[in-house]
Amino acid sequence: MKNTIAERIQDFLKEFPPFSMLKKEELLMISAQIRVLYLEKGTVVFKQDQKCHDEFYIVREGAIGLYRTTDNEQNLVDICDAGDLFGLRIMIIKKDYRMSAKADEESIVYAIPSSIFKPFIDENKEVNKFLLETFAAHARNYYTETEKGNRIDNTISIDTARDLSTLRTISYRKKPLICKPTAIVKDIALQMNAHKANSIVVTDENKYPLGIITDSDLRAKIATGLFPATSLVTEIMTAPVKTYSKKLTVAEAQIALIKNNISHLCITKDGTRNSKLAGVFSNHDLLVSFGNNPSVLIKEIKRVKKIQRLRYIRKQVERLLQTYLEQDIPTMHILNLISEINDALVVRTIEISLEEMPSPPPVKFSFLVLGSQGRREQLLITDQDNAIVFEDVGKEEYQSTQAYFLELARKITKSLHTIGFEYCPAEMMASNPRWCMSVSEWKTQFTDWMTTPTEESTLLSSIFFDFQSVYGDESMVNELSDVVFDGVNKSNRFLALLGVSALQKPSPLGFFKQFLVEQNGEHKDTFDIKTRAMMVLIDSARILTLYHNLKGINNTLLRYEKLAELEPNNKELFESCAKAFRVLLKFRARQGLIHKDSGRFIKLNTLSKNDKLRLKRCFRPIRDIQEVLRVRFQLKTLM
């Protein structure tokens, strides 16, 4: 006789890992032993510190919240939706529960006997691996970001970094400092200091390398008094030098430095000392080649003279990001590090561009980054969004002053494009006269956006109100912030219109919980993770931050953290929004690294079932935060 209930359970389970890894007859046998639990909202499945049940669970319908109680305060750790497993301790370590499980809404849950399922864990490595990973993911959730942060290592071991990158040829300094054998130590020390160089090569008349002097030589031989500063360079140089050809690989260079216990290699035309010097490769360059230390990369950025070198460094940042994602480093730590490097890239680009201008800036100015970089959320390189604000000048001087900064902006945006930051298709860049104005002009622009809002101004506000100064006079930027918050205080209508924009964002899921994809255009049949998921969370955090007059907080995660403090009644929702946004940020970054793009448009057929489930769990707070905006600003009357 057919067991209809077991078959229905089987039909559901086969869509989700680890059950999808089992044979049909195995799954049917398990399904026949499963208990079906109908849970009212608030029903407790198990409690923290309670002895483990002899079964684990999977959500069929509804949502189960996992809670951790600390100091008599119950905190939401995770929400389990359809297809999610929970209560796995019985399968892994058989100790008391570390969390409580409670139905957040009316739910149906399947209880799976551990004794029935255990043989499949022992026999199937994929099943075993999946359960361990799921258990570990839940376990990680109740460690704070700070606690995880204590275990962070900003460097990558050589074993971790040992991939194809070590087999590529080195990137060395092609214009090293050189001097003649008759040079005086004091003179070459001044030369090294002026060029911020840590070495100088002594060459003969044919530019063949005779010896090398490094910072350590100056410290050990001159600063200690062993030799006077008036000595000839030949008296303190290290000779003979170790020379190699341009085809030296990163791995070979590393071995050469370690083997010879030196910090610099000389690169010559044919790899011998009887050949013209082509460049120098140092320990510092080796670290940059691995791209494994953000402080080293930032130091390197500050020393760069050519924009093309910055492009190479930005590629190294992608490798650093890849490693951080693989190590599951806390999201805020990743954002802070990558943002610091991005800011350093922009600052150095501006400095180089200023050096190329025929004259210094006529007045004070500030270069602003907008959008995701302004929020310090730009993990992957995306379009440029930037602007310039300059000091007020007389009417007769305005045109020439603006012309200067437009020319500077063109150099900056062109160089940023060379580094890898694409031009903004809508030309929201400082090279556009609309985004290069004086303080007063910007104040007028902001005021117009807020007092006579249009569809365009609402869109622009969502980008420009997340501005951050990365170079120049910050006082002018503070003036612009004051204008924004003053406008909000005078009228909530502008916030309401921003709220309408957030509510009108396309939904991520259809009526039957399927992903909604683009219907036409270049990205047809892909899922737009930015517009359909991330932007609602970003917009909502911005609107509520403006509502509460929270100045100086641009980052979406920090905004939700502060909002949770200000509105305890919505604390759980804001924490859920922050958690969802963390997952979406990392998910998009991983997709971008895999497909070598911005990660925005995702081909769903490339995702595993587990990835799709992880995404769907992130969509839950989107609906709830939209409801907060709708009620607070009475948006039904405006739509």
Image (cartoon, rainbow, N blue to C red):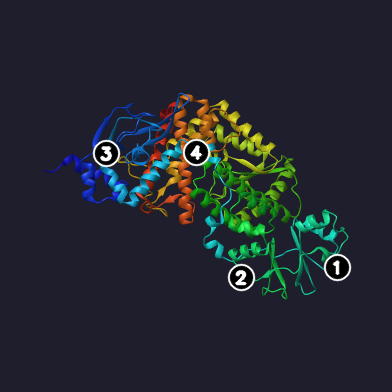
Front residue of 395 and 432: 432
Specify the amino acid type for callout 4.
Answer: Ile
Residue at the location (46% across, 48% down)? 588
Sequence order check, earlier mark of 4 and 2: 2
- 3 and 4 marks in contact (CB < 8 Å): no
* Disc 4 from disc 2: Cα separation: 47 Å
Sequence order check, earlier mark of 3 and 4: 3
Q: Which residue bears the numbered disc 2?
A: 247
Q: Which residue bears the numbered disc 3?
A: 113
Tag 2, which secondary structure? Answer: loop
Q: Badge 4, how many Cα within 10 Å: few under 14, some, many 20+?
A: many
Sequence order check, earlier mark of 3 and 1: 3
- In the drawing, does residue 478 fall left or right of residue 107? right
Give the position of the N terminus as an image quadrant: top left
Q: Nearer the viewer, mark 3 or mark 4?
A: 3
Specify the amino acid type for callout 2.
Answer: Lys
Q: Which residue bears the numbered disc 4?
A: 538
Sequence order check, earlier mark of 2 and 3: 3
* Disc 3 from disc 4: Cα separation: 42 Å
How many numbered discs sit on the rendered protein? 4
* Disc 2 from disc 1: Cα separation: 32 Å
Q: Quadrant of residue 216?
A: bottom right
